[in-house]
Image: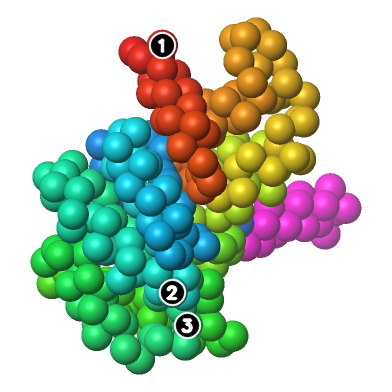
Amino acid sequence: MKLWIVTVIVIVAVVIAGLVIWLSFKKSSSLNCTPWTMPSWSQSIAYGTYNRKGSRGTKLVSQALDAGFRIIDNAMCYGNEEEVGAIIRESKIPRGEMVLITKVPPSHIGRMEEKLATTAELYGTSYMDVYMLHDQPDHFEDTIAAWKRLLRLHDKGKVKLVGMTNVSQAILEKLGKATGKLPMIIENSLRSVEDLEGSLANFCKKYGIVRLYFGVTKERNLTHPNVVTYARSHNISPHCAILRIVQEAGAIPVVGSANERHIIDNWRCVYKGKQEQD
């Protein structure tokens, strides 16, 4: 057989083999998950209730509600759901205007339903808006089991959105492949301003996953060149700038302001930013 014929055969074989591998990889890496519909509050600001205990702590939660905050971010491990729940019940704010968030730790996976019912009762409501797994168990099989339980609670109407905290894109993809459904909401630490437009952020935008970020006003973010430039161009503080940058990236900053003045400033900063966008 002539050399050129052999060469052509080899090239064709290599191309076909490469195409088969590519198609196999594409099939295995694709997600057959329907994107979620983002809620109307997906670009706002949340008040975090970590370490908000006792009369001073609950007063801050009350001041946040008075200032205009309607997303209250809590967790079972914070140990203050009874106190925060009392403030929610006493506020007289219409239930439909509030977004109540709680999180269940991996140690309570077997009691998810019971824990959710207890929290809802403390808050004086028949449902919670958001219920998230607070970190993942050591074994992924347990994470899948917990995620399926969260989905069942969602299907029963006990919670509007279910999701996870401190989660990577890799975990989200594995959950999607294992169950056919992705989390509807995640809450992560903002370790870098670049994260707002990174691979995970784009993944969430593609599938309609709400993003909350805590640790937004850490020094590393306030001194980031993009934040400093934004602050100067808008004649605002770096603190206000990072809140608006998060919001404009389609996410929700979680703040835990420790005095009334800062609470009001944070709310006005984001609310004014939304007005300017509109």
- The numbered mark, 2 or 3, whose residue comes first in the sequence reads 2
Tell me which residue sits at (47%, 23%) in the image. 269
Verify CB contact (< 8 Å) between mark 2 and mark 3.
no
Q: Is residue 2 magenta?
A: yes
Where's residue 9, x and y in %? Answer: 73, 56
Residue 103 in view (yes/no): no
Report whether 33 appears left or right of 164. left
Q: Secondary structure beneath disc 3?
A: helix
Front-most of residues 221 and 29: 221
List the residue tagged with mark 2.
79
Residue 8 in view (yes/no): yes
Report whether 198 appears left or right of 76. right
- The numbered mark, 1 or 3, whose residue comes first in the sequence reads 3
Where's residue 203, x and y in %? Answer: 50, 47
Quadrant assignment for the C terminus: top left
Q: Is residue 19 magenta?
A: yes
Q: What span is in magenta?
A: 1-21
Tell me which residue sits at (62%, 9%) in the image. 235
- Which label was assigned to residue 106? 3
Q: Secondary structure beneath disc 1?
A: helix
Front-most of residues 155 and 270: 270
**On screen, residue 210 above or below 181:** above
Q: Marks 2/3: CA distance?
A: 15 Å
